Image: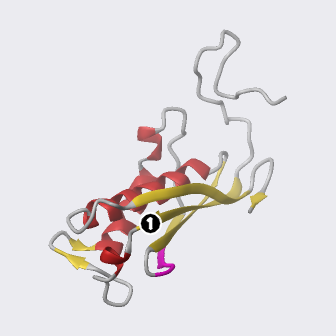
């Protein structure tokens, strides 16, 4: 059975020491699925909805990027990282649902899974905030890590 890495011998919280790790190229992609409903999707023109707060997807993408950069400020055991790149993509899946993909890359000593998950989540929350005047029936249904490369083990779903 694997041990928790963020606990010391006295079962107290600790930040993992990554000092001895090698710098490697690392990436992670997370996905958030979101139900918007027909009422909200019907307001879109092409792939964008313009509101009094601004363009929904463009604003949400910027929020996702900002969240990636601030992950260590909100997740206590995350290391501050020098991010190489962030790509956030929002797609309308059908007349009720959207899909958000957030891919983060670095060259570093620790992975960027939490950054990708945080970016996808913040993007979804921003879509919710931008569209709540139309309907509050939206649901952020699923947030998951799809892929991670670099480090000890790779994951691909």
Residue farthest toward the top in the current orientation of the protein: 10
Residue farthest toward the bottom in the current orientation of the protein: 46
Choose between 147 and 25: the one closer to the eye: 147
* 53 w.r.t. 82: above or below: below
How many residues crowd around disc 1 within 10 Å: few (fewer than 14), some, or many (20 or more)?
many
Q: Is residue 30 left or right of residue 20?
A: left
Residue farthest toward the right in the current orientation of the protein: 1
Q: Quadrant of the C terminus?
A: bottom right
Q: Residue drawn at (59%, 23%), measured in percent from left and top?
A: 14
Is residue 95 located in the magenta-colored stretch of the structure?
Answer: no
x and y percentages locating residue 151 in the rendered image: 75, 50
Is residue 93 located in the magenta-colored stretch of the structure?
Answer: yes
Q: Residue drawn at (41%, 48%), measured in percent from left and top?
A: 70
* The image quarter in which residue 7 lies: top right
Q: Residue drawn at (55%, 55%), measured in percent from left and top?
A: 143
Q: Is residue 1 left or right of residue 129?
A: right
x and y percentages locating residue 149 in the rendered image: 73, 59
* The image quarter in which residue 147 lies: bottom right
For label 1, the residue is: 35
x and y percentages locating residue 44 in the rendered image: 31, 84
Q: Secondary structure at mark 1?
A: strand
Range of magenta residues: 88-94
Q: Is residue 57 left or right of residue 133?
A: right
Image label count: 1
x and y percentages locating residue 88 in the rendered image: 48, 69
Chief secondary structure of the magenta portion: strand
């Amino acid at each position: 059975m694997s041990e928790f890495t963020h606990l010391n011998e006295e079962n107290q919280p600790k930040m993992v020491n990554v000092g001895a790790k090698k710098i490697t190229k690392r990436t992670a992609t997370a996905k958030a699925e979101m139900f918007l409903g027909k009422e909200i999707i019907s307001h879109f023109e092409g792939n964008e909805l313009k509101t009094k707060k601004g363009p929904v997807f463009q604003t949400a993408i910027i929020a996702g990027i900002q969240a990636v950069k601030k992950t260590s400020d909100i997740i206590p055991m995350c290391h501050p990282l020098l991010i190489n790149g962030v790509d956030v993509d929002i797609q309308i899946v059908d007349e009720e649902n959207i899909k958000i993909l957030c891919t983060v890359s670095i060259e570093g000593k620790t992975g960027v899974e939490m950054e990708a998950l945080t970016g996808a989540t913040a993007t979804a929350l921003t879509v919710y905030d931008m569209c709540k005047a139309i309907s509050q029936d939206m649901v952020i249904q699923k947030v998951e890590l799809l892929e991670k490369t670099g480090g000890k083990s790779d994951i691909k779903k």
